[in-house]
Image (spheres, rainbow, N blue to C red):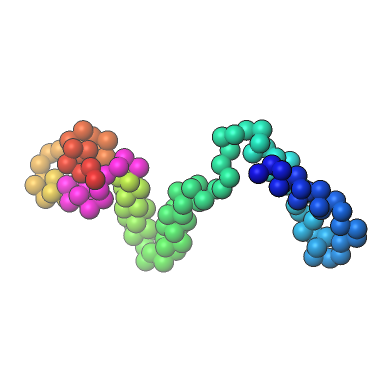
Amino acid sequence: MKKYVDEFYDFLDTIPNPSSKLKKAVEYAKKFQPRLENIYKIGELPLSNNPIEQVIRLSTLVRKNSLFARSVDGAKASAIFYSLVQTAKLNGLDIFKYFNYIFSLLEKRENVKVGAYLPWNSKVKEICTK
């Protein structure tokens, strides 16, 4: 892989007088050459930022959807809902089972501590794991 990157940058150096858009592209590539070469120095660097973008995608959607909430309370309710969904996902829970469990506890109207609803609670994990 490094061989091809080196060949690419050697090729860029052979372009005599690039004009307008090609010149911009060559300058851009050369500007980011040190960053690209960090991949060879630090093996743990990911080649793509797609996993990170997928993680923050939902928060971006929530922000956009909140613009259309009819009230501040509606926007807060949506934020709470999306937070619960993401937290359940991160804890490996089946979201449908998790919400069924939460609503069944609420339906009974028992005096249950908040900890009983949290995704990392051992009983929740036992009932709601995928």
> Along the line of sight, which residue is nearer the eye, 109 or 59?
59
Above or below, comparing residue 102 to residue 15 in the picture: above
Residue 50 percent across, percent down from the top left: 52, 51
Is residue 79 one of those drawn in magenta?
no
Residue 94 placement, left or right of 1: left
Give the residue drawn at x 27%, y 35%.
Answer: 120
The reply, left or right, for residue 128 in relation to residue 57 is: left
Answer with the quarter of the image where residue 66 lies: bottom left
Point out the stretch of residues depicted in magenta. Answer: 90-102
Is residue 113 visible in the rendered structure shown here?
no
The furthest residue to the right = 16
Task: Assign the C terminus to one quadrant of the image.
Answer: top left
Image quadrant holding the N terminus, namely top right
Can you say whether 25 is above or below 1 in the image? Answer: below
Dominant SS type (magenta):
helix
Residue at 21% over, 33% down: 122
Residue in the image at 35% along x and 42% along y: 90
Task: Check the image and report above or below for 22 versus 12.
Answer: below
Whether residue 58 can be seen here: yes
User: Which of the 4 quarters of the picture holds residue 72?
Assistant: bottom left
| Image coordinates for residue 25, horizontal then vertical, percent | 77, 59
Q: Quadrant of residue 18?
A: bottom right
The spot of residue 42 in percent (x, y) is 62, 33
